[in-house]
C-alpha cells in the first residue's frame, strides 16, 4: 500500500504516556483537531487506557468522534456559542463539560432548566478567549444556576512571567468562587507550587487539572518515524521540461515522485514563530529560496533532504535528484518529516523505532 506511513513503537509510546500521566496531577489529555496525527478516536482510546476521568476536544463537533470510546467527561475547549446548534445541544449533555468565555453566554446557560456543567475561562495575556478578571465577581452571581466545575486558565507558551500570571489569575478566580483550576501550558511542578501557595493555612489547595496535548502525545520523538512511498522515478536530461509548470531541469538527474501532498499537510507551513533576529534571518533566507522557485522538501533520499521540483501537488510531490545520486526504486519507503499537528497520514503501523 502506497502513501504516508507513521511507524509507531507502540510500547515505547505508551511508556511515555504512562510516565507523563504519573507526573501530571489531574491530567486532562487534549485530543483536538487532527488528533496530533493519530486521529481523535485513537487518542480517546489511549486516554481511556490511561485511566483518566476527562479529556478535552477543541470544538463541539468533535465530541461525537470520541464519546463512544471514552467513558469519562468530554471537555469542549472552545467557548460556548449560542449560534452553534451542536454546542447548544451538548450543553445539556451530562457527559459534556462546556467552557464559557463570555458573561452573556454564562447568563444564557444559567437560564437552562438542566443546570449545565460549566467551566469558566479567565482571560489571560493571550487575549484570545475569557472573561476579564475584573468581572469575575459578576460570574459568581450566576454560578448557583449552573454546575460550576472550575476555572480555565489557558496560558501563552512564553515562559517569561507565565507562573506569576497564573498566580495572579488563579487568586482572582478563587476569590470570586472556590473551584478546581484547569490550566494549560504550565509545568506540573510550577502549577502545584502555585496552588499550594494560594491555599490558606490549614486548608487544602484547590484541585488541579492540567491539560496536555503536544507534550503528552508527541513528547517522545524517538517512538515514531514517518515515511513516504516512492511512486515513480524518471531519468531526465538537463533542460528537459518537467512538472506541471514545465520548468527546465537544472541538470541531468532524476524526478522522483513520492506520496504525500498538500491535502496531507506536506509543504504546508504556519506563519513563522521566529522571535529572535537570527530566527527571522533564517526564515527570510528560506522565503527567498521559495520566491526564486527553490524549496527544500521534508523528504530524505540517500541521506539528504532533497529539493522539491515544484510546489507539492494535492496527493503527491515531485523531487529532483542530481546525476550521481542513486535514485530509490518504485515502492521504496523514504523518510519524510511531518508536523503531526497538521499532517494526515494514510496508515499507522506498529513497528519498533530505530
Image: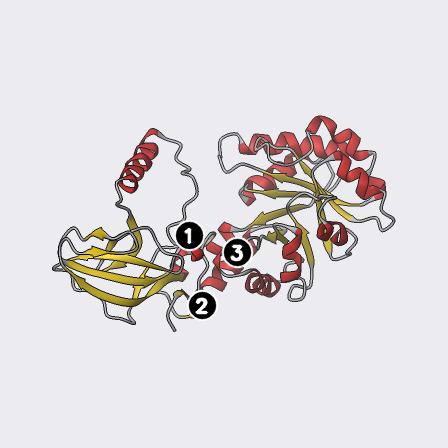
What is the quadrant of residue 287 in the picture? Answer: top left
Q: Nearer the viewer, residue 184 or 118?
A: 118
Which residue in the structure is indicated by mark 2? 347
For the residues labelled 3 and 2, the Cα–Cα distance comes to: 14 Å
Quadrant of the image containing the N terminus: bottom left
Against 208, residue 334 (above or below) is below
What is the quadrant of residue 164 in the picture? Answer: top right
Which residue in the structure is indicated by mark 3? 34
Q: Earlier in the sequence, mark 3 or mark 2?
A: 3
Q: Secondary structure at mark 2?
A: strand
Q: Earlier in the sequence, mark 2 or mark 1?
A: 1
For the residues labelled 3 and 1, the Cα–Cα distance comes to: 11 Å
Kindly indicate whether the residue at mark 2 contacts the one at mark 3 (C-beta within 8 angstroms): no
For the residues labelled 2 and 1, the Cα–Cα distance comes to: 16 Å
State the residue at coordinates (75%, 50%).
Answer: 88
Q: Residues within 10 Å of mark 2 (few under 14, many from 20)?
A: few
Q: Nearer the viewer, residue 350 or 36?
A: 36
Q: Is residue 118 left or right of residue 262?
A: right
Does residue 354 appear anywhere in the picture? no
What is the quadrant of residue 319 in the picture? Answer: bottom left
Colour scheme: secondary structure
Quadrant of the image containing the C terminus: bottom left
Q: Nearer the viewer, residue 74 or 174?
A: 74
Q: Earlier in the sequence, mark 3 or mark 1?
A: 3
State the residue at coordinates (43%, 70%).
Answer: 349
Residue 344 % position (x, y): 46, 59
Q: Which mark is residue 339?
A: 1
Kindly indicate whether the residue at mark 1 contacts the one at mark 2 (C-beta within 8 angstroms): no
Amino acid at each position: 500500500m502506497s502513501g504516508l506511513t507513521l511507524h509507531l513503537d507502540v510500547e515505547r509510546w505508551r511508556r511515555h504516556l504512562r510516565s507523563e500521566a504519573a507526573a501530571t496531577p489531574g491530567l486532562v489529555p487534549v485530543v483536538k483537531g487532527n488528533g496530533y496525527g493519530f486521529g481523535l478516536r485513537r487518542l480517546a482510546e489511549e486516554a481511556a487506557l490511561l485511566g483518566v476521568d476527562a479529556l478535552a476536544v477543541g470544538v463541539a463537533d468533535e465530541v461525537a468522534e470520541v464519546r463512544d470510546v471514552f467513558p469519562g467527561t468530554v471537555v469542549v475547549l472552545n467557548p460556548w456559542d449560542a449560534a452553534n446548534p451542536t454546542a447548544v445541544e451538548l450543553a445539556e449533555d451530562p457527559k459534556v463539560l462546556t467552557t464559557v468565555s463570555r458573561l452573556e453566554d454564562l447568563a444564557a446557560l444559567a437560564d437552562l432548566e438542566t443546570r449545565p456543567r460549566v467551566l469558566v475561562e479567565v482571560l489571560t495575556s493571550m487575549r484570545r478567549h475569557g472573561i476579564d478578571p475584573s468581572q469575575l465577581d459578576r460570574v459568581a452571581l450566576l454560578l448557583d444556576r449552573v454546575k460550576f466545575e472550575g476555572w480555565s486558565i489557558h496560558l501563552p507558551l512564553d515562559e517569561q512571567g507565565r507562573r506569576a500570571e497564573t498566580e495572579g489569575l488563579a487568586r482572582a478566580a478563587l476569590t470570586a468562587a472556590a473551584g478546581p483550576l484547569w490550566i494549560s501550558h504550565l509545568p506540573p511542578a510550577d502549577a502545584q507550587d502555585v496552588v499550594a501557595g494560594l491555599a490558606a493555612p490549614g486548608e487544602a489547595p484547590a484541585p488541579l487539572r492540567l491539560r496536555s496535548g503536544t507534550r503528552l502525545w508527541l513528547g517522545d520523538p524517538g517512538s515514531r518515524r514517518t515515511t513516504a512511498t516512492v511512486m515513480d522515478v524518471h531519468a531526465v536530461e538537463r533542460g528537459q521540461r518537467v512538472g506541471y509548470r514545465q520548468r527546465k531541469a537544472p541538470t541531468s538527474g532524476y524526478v522522483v515522485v513520492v506520496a504525500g501532498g498538500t491535502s496531507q499537510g506536506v509543504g504546508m507551513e504556519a506563519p513563522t514563530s521566529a522571535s529572535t533576529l537570527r530566527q527571522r534571518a533564517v526564515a527570510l533566507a528560506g522565503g527567498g529560496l521559495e520566491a526564486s522557485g527553490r524549496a527544500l522538501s521534508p523528504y530524505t533520499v540517500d541521506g539528504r533532504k532533497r529539493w522539491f521540483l515544484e510546489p507539492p501537488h494535492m496527493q503527491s510531490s515531485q523531487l529532483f535528484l542530481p546525476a550521481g545520486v542513486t535514485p530509490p526504486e518504485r515502492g521504496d519507503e523514504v523518510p519524510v518529516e511531518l508536523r503531526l499537528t497538521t499532517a494526515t497520514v494514510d496508515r499507522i503501523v506498529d513497528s519498533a523505532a530505530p
